[in-house]
Image (tube, rainbow, N blue to C red):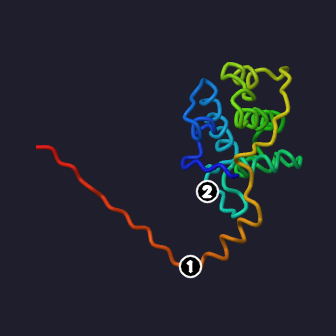
Amino acid sequence: MFFFNSSGYMAPEYAMEGLFSVKSDVYTFGVLLLEIISGRRNRSLGSPEYSNIIGYAWDLWDSGKAMELIDPSVVGSCHPIKALRCIHVAMLCVQDSAGDRPTMSSVVLMLESENATLPMPRQPTFTSMRSSRNVDVLKENQDVASSNDATISLIIGR
């Protein structure tokens, strides 16, 4: 099962079940933090393997290559330990389960304090990269024409 969220900023529990909490904003903050760090928009990675920045960031994080996420135009001028801490906090913010995400006040403390110990994030499941099978299916269907018909009704009051 793959999670699809048209904006890419909605917390999974809100997009799938309509449940909103204080942790929903934390998810959005995490996505924005990843965008700021990488200099890339959430949905415009230019790669068919990744549907969003969270899957891309997780793969780099998990393989020990998190520094590759940092925008190349600022990588030379940023402090590596602080940049890695921001990525770590962002990965905690985009956890699938609201219960696994920190509160916003905890996020602020994590970013302000270099002494705070951060828990290890879990792999986001809903936003992980597409399987190679799905990419193959997309490539196979490129030659198939599709038609999207829509009817628009305009209601005008008197």
| Amino acid at circle 1 | Val
State the image coordinates of residue 14 (x, y, percent, origin top left): 58, 35
State the image coordinates of residue 106 (x, y, percent, origin top left): 72, 20
> In front of the other: label 2 or label 1?
1
Name the residue carrying label 2: 44
Which mark identifies residue 21?
Answer: none
Mark 1 residue crowding within 10 angstroms, few (<14) / some (14–19) / many (20+)? few
**Viewer-proximal residue, 17 or 4?**
17
- What's the residue at 78%, 20% (across, down)? 113
Name the residue carrying label 1: 144
| Amino acid at circle 2 | Ser
Q: Is residue 2 left or right of residue 144?
A: right
Q: Secondary structure at mark 2?
A: loop
Q: Residue furthest left?
A: 158
Q: Is residue 134 left or right of residue 121?
A: left
Q: Secondary structure at mark 1?
A: loop
Q: Is residue 85 left or right of residue 138?
A: right
The CA distance from mark 2 to mark 1 is 24 Å
Q: Compared with residue 83, is residue 103 higher up or lower down, i.e. above or below? A: above
- What's the residue at 82%, 39% (across, down)? 80
State the image coordinates of residue 96 (x, y, percent, origin top left): 71, 37
Mark 2 residue crowding within 10 angstroms, few (<14) / some (14–19) / many (20+)? few
- What's the residue at 59%, 30% (across, down)? 25
Q: Is residue 76 left or right of residue 14?
A: right
- What's the residue at 51%, 78% (across, down)? 145
State the image coordinates of residue 132 (x, y, percent, origin top left): 77, 65
Badge 2 vs badge 1, beta-carbon distance below 8 Å? no
Q: Compared with residue 114, is residue 139 higher up or lower down, i.e. above or below? A: below
Q: Earlier in the sequence, mark 2 or mark 1?
A: 2
**Viewer-proximal residue, 139 or 2?**
2
